[in-house]
Image (cartoon, coloured by chain):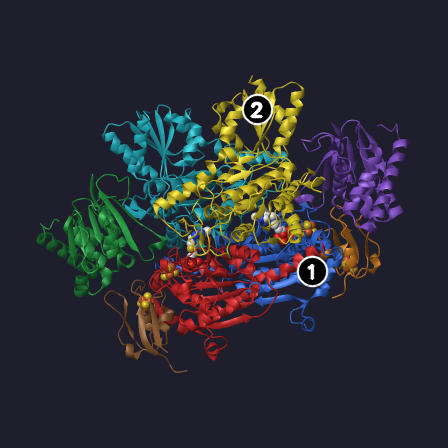
Chain colours: A yellow, B cyan, C blue, D red, E orange, F brown, G purple, H green
Amino acid sequence: MGQTPKFVQGNEACVEAALYAGLNFFAGYPITPSTEIAEHLSVRLPQLGGKFVQMEDEIASLCAIIGASLTGCKVMTATSGPGFSLMQEALGYAVMAEIPCVIANVQRGGPSTGIPTHVSQGDVNQARWGTHGDHAIIALTASNHQDVFAMTVEAFNLAETYRTPVILLFDEVVGHMREKLLVPEPGELPLVERMRTSVKEGVDYHPYLPREDGRLPMSDFGGVHRYNVTGLVHDMWGFPSTDPKVVHGLLRHLVDKIENRAGILAHYKEHQLEDAEIVMISYGSSARSALHVVEDRRQRGERLGLLELQTLWPFPHELVRRKCDQAKAVVVVEMNMGQVMQAVKLSVPQPERVFLANRIDGNFITPGDIMNILRIIQGKGV
Amino acid sequence: MGQTPKFVQGNEACVEAALYAGLNFFAGYPITPSTEIAEHLSVRLPQLGGKFVQMEDEIASLCAIIGASLTGCKVMTATSGPGFSLMQEALGYAVMAEIPCVIANVQRGGPSTGIPTHVSQGDVNQARWGTHGDHAIIALTASNHQDVFAMTVEAFNLAETYRTPVILLFDEVVGHMREKLLVPEPGELPLVERMRTSVKEGVDYHPYLPREDGRLPMSDFGGVHRYNVTGLVHDMWGFPSTDPKVVHGLLRHLVDKIENRAGILAHYKEHQLEDAEIVMISYGSSARSALHVVEDRRQRGERLGLLELQTLWPFPHELVRRKCDQAKAVVVVEMNMGQVMQAVKLSVPQPERVFLANRIDGNFITPGDIMNILRIIQGKGV
Amino acid sequence: MSVKEYLRERFLPHLWCPGCGHGEVLGGLVRAIEQLGLSKNELVMVSGIGCSSRISGYVDFHTLHTIHGRALAFATGVKIARPELKLIVPMGDGDALAIGGNHFIHAARRNLDLTALVMNNRIYGMTGGQFSPLSGENVSATTAPYKTIDRGFDIAELAKAAGATFVARSTTFHVQQMIEIIAKAITHKGFSVVEVLTQCPTYFGRKNKIGDAADMITWFKDHTTPIGSKAKQENPGLIERGIFVQKQEPEYCEEYEKVVARARGGRS
Amino acid sequence: MSVKEYLRERFLPHLWCPGCGHGEVLGGLVRAIEQLGLSKNELVMVSGIGCSSRISGYVDFHTLHTIHGRALAFATGVKIARPELKLIVPMGDGDALAIGGNHFIHAARRNLDLTALVMNNRIYGMTGGQFSPLSGENVSATTAPYKTIDRGFDIAELAKAAGATFVARSTTFHVQQMIEIIAKAITHKGFSVVEVLTQCPTYFGRKNKIGDAADMITWFKDHTTPIGSKAKQENPGLIERGIFVQKQEPEYCEEYEKVVARARGGRS
Amino acid sequence: MAKPKLKQHHINRDWCKGCGICVELCPKKVLELDDQDKVTVVRPQDCICCRLCELRCPDFAIEVETQE
Amino acid sequence: MAKPKLKQHHINRDWCKGCGICVELCPKKVLELDDQDKVTVVRPQDCICCRLCELRCPDFAIEVETQE
Amino acid sequence: MERCRLVFSGSGGQGVITAAIILAEAAVICENLNAVQSQSYGAEARGGATRSDVIIADSAIRYPKVIQPNVLVCLTQEAYNKFSAIIRPGGLLITDSRYVKIQRKVDAQQRELPMYRSVMEQIGKPIVFNICMLGAVIALTGVLHPESIMKVLEGRVPRDFLELNQRALHLGMELGRTAAHSSATART
Amino acid sequence: MERCRLVFSGSGGQGVITAAIILAEAAVICENLNAVQSQSYGAEARGGATRSDVIIADSAIRYPKVIQPNVLVCLTQEAYNKFSAIIRPGGLLITDSRYVKIQRKVDAQQRELPMYRSVMEQIGKPIVFNICMLGAVIALTGVLHPESIMKVLEGRVPRDFLELNQRALHLGMELGRTAAHSSATART
Ligand SMILES: Cc1ncc(C[n+]2csc(CCOP(=O)(O)OP(=O)(O)O)c2C)c(N)n1
Ligand SMILES: Cc1ncc(C[n+]2csc(CCOP(=O)(O)OP(=O)(O)O)c2C)c(N)n1
Ligand code: SF4
Ligand code: SF4
Ligand code: SF4
Ligand code: SF4
């Protein structure tokens, strides 16, 4: 049955993927345009014996899934801009306490209440820097439902692998549009399960002592190991410490476990980059318009290619540098004022060759919008 | 009397400056290491007939001062990391509704609860990107009490001039240490007062129609002009709109009014930069250690200089480029993992010549720490 | 002044669905204000986010449309800064008591002199019909396909326990009572809470098969009763209408004046 | 098991000030648990931030030291995910009812089966003595140099109105009663709230010239009385001690089982 | 005071959304919706001027004008 | 049941913070603080083994051991 | 290659969005084509004109919105006024004769069909108005087979309502066919 | 040029921080010098050893912390154990003889003064213990004039407590002087 296609919204594809990945606890608070994720889960989770809870707000939602994660559940919450802003404190806690959890942010127009029902990709930098203090984060995105499915599964896998919150940065267009989805057969996509400690009862268990491979086996609350979890800087047992060595060690660990793996964490797709003179870089729904342009112009012989980023954080600087080194010009296509463009400029040797094709008026960026910019760039004789 | 020195904490210097600037409404919620700001104001404001309110949390605190600002008050709140994270949604509202207000974040060790009583400068990027959606922000900082005073007054002035929230990004060391403060005589420092509309009763007043000089005159709640304030995208009357032209226009206005003025907004101090081969860039308390090093090494004939940034956002790219163009090496001294260093790399032509001298273990960075890095760099033969 | 003069007529017809009770509450509110003959310049309306909160767009007062759940926090700032202004804070049930619950109980505790108007349709309308903390058990909603299990708040009880000094409830069926109560609440010195049971035909009505707007309004007639009525004793399931609490206690802004006096008296 | 076996002795002496009542509450709690003979592996303690919340570091349970005001939200996740675990959620008065007020009333509304233990010292200890929503009027604090004007919450009233099914109050003077009540609260099925009046000699005591820890404890003896006592009628100013509410109502996790049943029954 | 006599119903067809509240809750069944789903007065003679339609209309679409 | 007889007070001087709670609230004034501000038993014979000092000590620093 | 770009418009209650979903789903599930459906949301989706876009194609669809529909359906005057201008020159414009008075002339084949009236007269249940509309669209465009629509409906509506929907679908197809013949030359 | 770097340490209740502030404030307000005072906070400032740093100089002070004090005061054993090692070689180490038992030998001039005992015996009010300590520091270092301290105290303590503080200050200065003479050679 897995192979009979479904015709669903992107938000529903995210739900199907989460369940495929083993989600069994969701807590959330409704907000446009992410609400369908909660709505579909309120139907599906109870059927599977999982837990669906509607909390009093987004802060409580994230706190609740963190608590549930510590009991061994695979957990998720979903929100949009304003709710994501409210989650920033608890997000930092999940980073600090190294709690596997997934947070979907289906982006809408901001800042503030903005244009709630219109599309935007304005939360990219917030996903990276929204909570206080130095930290690292993983953020994934996708442009079509099959990829929404794949990236959602990957989000759960990375959350478990690195004991970290993972952000799914979708947008209103992908979240709300309906298209075909083929749900993979069980086993078709690899799943990373909670790594539980092999330490026996009575033997000293260190919840925050990384193994050689960097992973930190966990022990479910209610199990035989009783330890402490805190948002304070803590030692390998999870107890508060202000010892400078401990502080330095913990903060480096939290950042390095992710930043040092930017290479292997980099998910992306490329379209006709081989001989591309102009490399477009895009992600999420904007990548659909960008790809439309590539396919359209290629027919007319223009040497145009697209690098579609699926991992936004840690930013794949190395990948971007590599893919762009032949390019005469790099055009970042996004629906914000150039948040990813800034990161691209940091990646390439010639930042002055990086251009922005964007739209910020709440409407979905069209191939025409992109073409207009390309004309200008080409006019520049690039 | 203004000229008899006071011996105070940095937090108290901030309080004196806020009152000097005309603060008459403060709402806050205690948190280390910013609490002294609230404590001192709870003594001083009532004496002056101003309003001091302790709210139920930080969210309510920021909301309350926004409301008070609309009645014509000069307003402020103060917090630290976790509270600042909670304020992100309301901060975006202040940006969107263009509400003059000042938010002091006395930084402590993060992420999460982190090391509450220890110093850090880890919230620099959060100040820029903490709330959802594209936006611009002004953030100021200082390294000594006289500058804390000056920058606090400037924060109120800029908030009024640009109808925007302004963030004071101090840190635990400056906030808690005591040193001399000379409170300027009244009139000694220029003050920007609330610009109220000259439009008469009955005549159509546009709260969100910028004048040629870009300023938007306000009308106090309770006055003769009744208008609407909202966090939704809105037209020049303040009423919700989803018209793409209105959306585009408003978002550009919100960002351009600040980003386009990065030059004139750039406050800084320079120490012996003229012939400096190594330019150190620092801010806040770290700049004290950096300056210590400059003065110390200059005696030994090393050509070392310091650019102390007081405006962190909008980032003074142009200034930094100019001040560094003679330098063999640029060393950013900060107590985080290189947040300002990233911005500096974006400013200078040779990012590879930018180095980081930092400390992240909760202890205050020492001149010795900086010297060690300098040795390494010099070892690199730079 | 006529009722319509309190409205921003240019924005009518409003964005609410046909039969939405929020329009009736808006009508009740402006009629109450018209009866009190208040001047528009002394009126400030602060609302949050929700269909209900859009009410602030339609009244010709100083209007502050804020963020979800925080209306009372913003209002606290406005009121303490300018105690002479009259504040009206309409909120949806979710706005007031889901995400906004904490500001609700704290504003009540401070006995701040303003009127909190809870437009309780027992659902999240704006986001498309999810259940709210006022839905109560056994209600269908887009996030409760198997019916709700959460118990609902009793707004009046909660407001009372938190310290509100005026607490009342009415419905969109009992329009005259609604107007009368809102007028009393506005004139009350201190924190006043008026809960109006109102209909969301689009979501609550449809999802729970209560019929159209008129049927929902009739439901309020059949399922409510005056406070302490005999009917209530016979059928405890009935919801009471009327004024539950009305008492004088120290009001925050007045108390603050004393703080200023003490400070000026130099006691520290 | 002996009382000490429930403690992480290696961390004693704890970080609380000399005479801090939080230590007495810790003692009362572990003694209650010892009497109930609960196994450490089935116990989860979730606390927020504050001096009080540091209690989770000293008990040898599964301990979750979270963020300020959110303990009950985290606890909601733990409990619903693993209903068989026993949850104890100690909070300071600020933690529970200032920033945490919303989660407090919503956890009560859901009647989630856990024990909320409010260690009420009427002050923010951790941050150095600012007033709290429980300070009440006429109290001196570092942010109330001219004394407080805010009225205080009545935790018991609020918990009751919000839907708690077990509500009680004791003090650090009445240690035996405290132990007994905590034990009853833990065994109660549903949301139980125990408020313990406790002393912060360092800030509340000093600022309000009540004397040392022992004097503060004695204050509790002189200013409290059993619920409904004659003394209360004669002197309404007295604070009542004892169990205010104890009733059985549908518990959230049990109700959720029904949702699963309905879903599996395919009703949708 | 003499009970008021109806002068006329003022109906704002642009504002009326045809929700039917006034129609169904009019004690005298004075009102109906036309084929455009707008309210119309079909039995003015029965109107007792209780104004409930006016007060309950969510859209300010109906006003009852009375004599003296 | 026979009222318990005191065997001894176990005092943990490392844990005792000298707050004086046990001293001041002991109904029989059995305890005192020494010059190091640590609790000591000065009138064991008066002890009625009510254990209030044990129960009220915030620091688990005093335990009352009784015979049978 | 793209087969068809459609825009269905009307008022909230009329079910135009559902119709669009059914059509697109039928294309994907039953005829193994690609299809995307999207719609305009709005806090103001309370009342006002709703719109739903559908693209049906053999190949992958990248840009999911419809800028110039070659089939435009308007079921209310407001929708007609708002959207009629966007139709592709020579496209097909379907309106309901009860709700829409054609005003502006546009370069398109205009079909005013008495869909609502017929549904009320012959079936008496307004809920299937949108299915009737679907029938007309299929008859006039031949973009999909009616069986595909029925198959999707089977998965969506309770058994005892199926027959009702089937009748509405066929009713719409009739209206469409007759219109097609009658005014083959009515190109305005 | 820097005149003096001091570290005062003890337990929370002893008022070492207040003493440090008074000293630094006196330098700034009364002797027109520069001074910085800072202290170690800690959620664990509940009990534990507190520490306060003071730097006094003629010129501007940049780095505000004291790494190697040339004057170290320890009023509890815990503070002594924790901090005695950081003293500058040849520096001045002042301890209270009731609370601190000197153990480790450090390259410094060690002064064990019976400050607490003297305060209790001659004044009977423990609150002025820290002022007595200040007196000793001044006598032993001459870093400031006692009048400056008194001037600052006037601004801080209620009038009727002034005399008390003055006595404590002088008591401390005596203890300091005698110690200075008695053990001029006690350099260990
Ligand atoms: C922080 C935040 N979370 C969630 C939302 C989404 N949201 C908007 S209104 C609303 C609730 C609406 O329900 P209610 O307050 O009862 O008002 P109603 O629409 O029913 O009148 C929600 C959840 C938001 N705008 N902001
Ligand atoms: C979001 C946030 N705001 C503020 C703080 C600072 N803070 C820590 S504990 C506390 C209150 C402590 O008082 P209470 O909860 O009554 O516990 P106590 O310390 O008195 O035991 C505050 C305001 C914080 N840690 N996080
Ligand atoms: S959705 Fe419900 S609450 Fe919102 S406008 Fe429509 S009827 Fe009113
Ligand atoms: S400050 Fe108060 S609450 Fe905190 S530990 Fe000390 S006595 Fe206890
Ligand atoms: S006034 Fe009363 S009787 Fe007359 S139409 Fe309106 S509701 Fe009916
Ligand atoms: S109560 Fe405990 S800590 Fe306090 S003095 Fe007695 S034994 Fe020591």
The answer to which of A21 and G141 lies nearer the viewer is: A21
Q: Same chain for the residues at labels 2 and 1, yes or no?
A: no
* On-image quarter of the N terminus of chain D: bottom left
Query: Which element type, helix, strand or loop, lies under badge 2?
Result: strand
Nearer to us of marks 2 and 1 is 2
**What is the C-alpha distance between the residues marked 2 and 1?**
65 Å
The answer to which of C144 and C12 lies nearer the viewer is: C144
**Residue ID at (53%, 65%):** D192
Query: Which element type, helix, strand or loop, lies under badge 1?
Result: helix
Residue G27 drawn at (x, y percent)? 76, 36
Q: Is residue D239 above or below residue H144?
A: below
Q: Which residue is mark 2?
A: A279
Residue kind at label 2, given as amino acid type: Val
Residue kind at label 1, given as amino acid type: Val
Q: Is residue B258 above or below residue C220?
A: above
Q: Is residue C50 left or right of residue B81?
A: right
The answer to which of G162 and E42 lies nearer the viewer is: G162
Residue C73 drawn at (x, y percent)? 52, 53
The answer to which of H152 and C253 lies nearer the viewer is: H152
